[in-house]
Image (tube, rainbow, N blue to C red):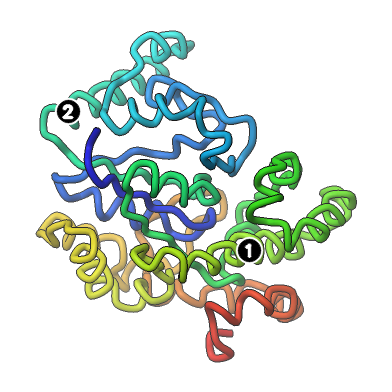
Amino acid sequence: MTLEPILVTGSHRSGTTWIGRTLTRSPRLAWVAEPFHPQHRQGVFGGRFPHWFMYLCAENAGPWVDDFERLLDARYRWVLGAKGIRRPVDAGLAARDAGRFIRRRLTHQRPLIKDPIALFSTPWLAERFDMDVVLMVRHPAAFAWSLVRLDWRFDLANWLDQPLLCRDLIGPWEDDLRRMHERGRSGRTTIEEAALLWSVMYGVADGWRAAYPDWHFVRHEDISADPRAGFAELCAALDVPFDATISAMIETTTAQNNPVAAPANRAHALARDSRGNRRAWAERLAHDDIEALRELTEPVATRWYGAEDW
């Protein structure tokens, strides 16, 4: 198996795509996107997960170990890839995926898995496959604004229907999650939902900081403020050369002449004014919503952000 894969995770909307895409400009790294996504292409990763943010641990991960070993060894699942072809575009995607696997095997590229949906499974992945972990952190108001902008909502049953997840990680918030779940989507606002999601994910992540001192916890706001220095430090920590290709990607995606905010209907728009984007939420969220987010997330947010960050 390839040694020391890199996992870039964190909450969704935390900048994992930007970080992963920038790092994989290095010819030494290979981009692998979201094997934990319930609708991923099975040529890339053969297994299917029944829930968003599936929690894997030694107790339940057995059925997926072979899938991860194949993924990290760049062994494309040709039969499953062929079965997934329904349209011409599917054939093109399968060919691209297979080509990436072949190139990775021939050039011995180190896989970088970008997957916020893997967040809760990070300890098992890191320990089982000796992964270097980059865990992205983003301000709760920025996270909430991103969900509001995209009108992204979440079915809390994905978490509550995982007994091991409730037992091991999210127990302190289980009652709050069940109460919100019982209210239904129409009975809660996006702001309330975002505040609870953020609190759970980063409450769990905060507990990992002492347990896993070798992991790299990166605040989106910090690397956005000085992306060249931030990426240089991250590359050094991951033993990735900070070369001209990465430098050019940083210049392209963070320049001050880029838009501050992404278009309303686009999930991923990498070219931003990174410095201006750090507090874009302050001009877009209503004052009452910001105050509500601050109050609702305070027990966890104070572990990551100070009063000056609001």
Residue that appears at 38% across and 25% down: 44
* Residue pointed to by mark 1: 198
SS label for mark 1: helix
Disc 1 to disc 2: CB gap under 8 Å: no
Instruction: Classify 230 as above or below 20.
Output: below
Residue 33 horizontal/vertical position (percent): 39, 39
Q: Give the answer, above or below, for where 125 lies relative to 292.
A: above
Q: Give the labeled residue for mark 2.
A: 105
- Residue 48 lies, in percent from the top left, at 54, 25
Q: Quadrant of residue 179?
A: bottom right
Give the answer, above or below, for where 90 lies relative to 310.
above
- The mark total stands at 2
Instruction: Say which element carries label 2.
Output: helix
Q: To which quarter of the image does residue 132 belong?
A: bottom left
Q: Residue at x 11, y 33 (%)?
A: 107
Quarter of the picture holding the N terminus: top left
Which residue is at 55% across, 67% downward?
A: 207
**Looking at the image, is mark 1 or mark 2 earlier in the sequence?**
2
